[in-house]
Image (tube, grey):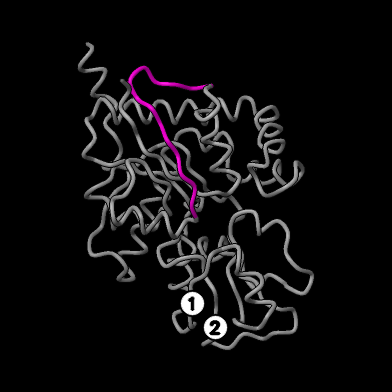
Amino acid sequence: MKKNISVAHSPDSDDIFMYMAIKFGWVDSKWLNFTNKADDIQTLNEATLRGLYDICAISFALYPFVADDFALLRTAVSFGEGYGPKLIKKKDRKLKPNFKVALSGEHTSNALLFHIAYPNARIIYKNFLEIENAVLSGEVDAGVLIHESILDFSDELCVEREIWDIWKELCEEDLPLPLGGMCLRRSLPLTDAIECERVLTDAVKVAHDHKKLLSKMLIERNLVRINDEKLDAYLNLYANKNSISMDEKQLRACDKMFELGYRHGFYGSLIRADENLIPTEYLNARNG
């Protein structure tokens, strides 16, 4: 009997796209069976703080809080490169220093950067699907849109500031913006952990290599919230060849985010991304 591995990811199109090669049986493991659950990103961040899943999608900004219990996976990652979440407001609204804003979650990457850039703003947290309406109704003065909502929002709204621009100002380096990643429970046996990362990496690669076919299947089965044109645009942003396995530049970007959070008092200690990856070299040493 195969050992069961619980995987949680967000319901947004890039996470669905990157996982479904496993669900459809295109990628498999000889001894592990994967079950999945979809939930909004802040719910997943909170679930990871409670240790609910073996593997969970998280905001990169959360990772320092869970590094003792979870290793960082190299795969199924989303970075912004010249784009990312957007701070939006009504076109006729002028924002005061203490403006009220809706964010998608306390531990999200955009929330970390927003806190640093706007220390006087009054923040409330909402499901990301509710943020646009909260701005339109006047419940809040502004909101940060994430996921597919950055592609299409009301003509009554405008972009006050790109979170990407905040990142570039704070980062002061040519690095991509770390948004979403995945982590794995450290209590799993190392051979299982390495196999989990292999399967997930293969799933993202297969999805990327068969993008048109998989996208068509997702739309036909109503597994995504957007049409084929928007899906293609969104996947180009957040589920692309750079999502398959983190490179050195992406790891440095994570380190920069962790450093910014530590410097501004959000984290109690400073960690490095590469020191928290699964040591895949173990298999080579074991088989050598």
159 shown above or below 171 = below
Give the residue drawn at x 49%, y 63%.
110
Distance from label 1 to label 2 (Cα)? 8 Å
Q: Looking at the rendering, which quadrant does residue 129 occupy?
A: bottom right
Q: Can you give x and y, in whole percent of width and height, for residue 46 in the image?
A: 36, 59
Observer-nearest residue: 277 or 147?
Answer: 147
Residue 13: quarter of image = top right
In the image, the segment drawn in magenta is 26-39
Q: Residue 132: x percent and y percent?
A: 65, 69
Task: Tell whether position 94 is magenta.
Answer: no
The image quadrant where one finds the C terminus is top left
247 sits to left or right of 231: left
Q: Which mark is residue 63?
A: none
Which residue lies most toward the top here?
A: 288
**Residue sitting at 58 percent across and 43 percent down?**
14
- The residue carrying pointer 2 sits among few (fewer than 14), some (14 to 19) or many (20 or more) residues within 10 Å by Cα, namely some
Which residue position is annotated with label 1? Answer: 124
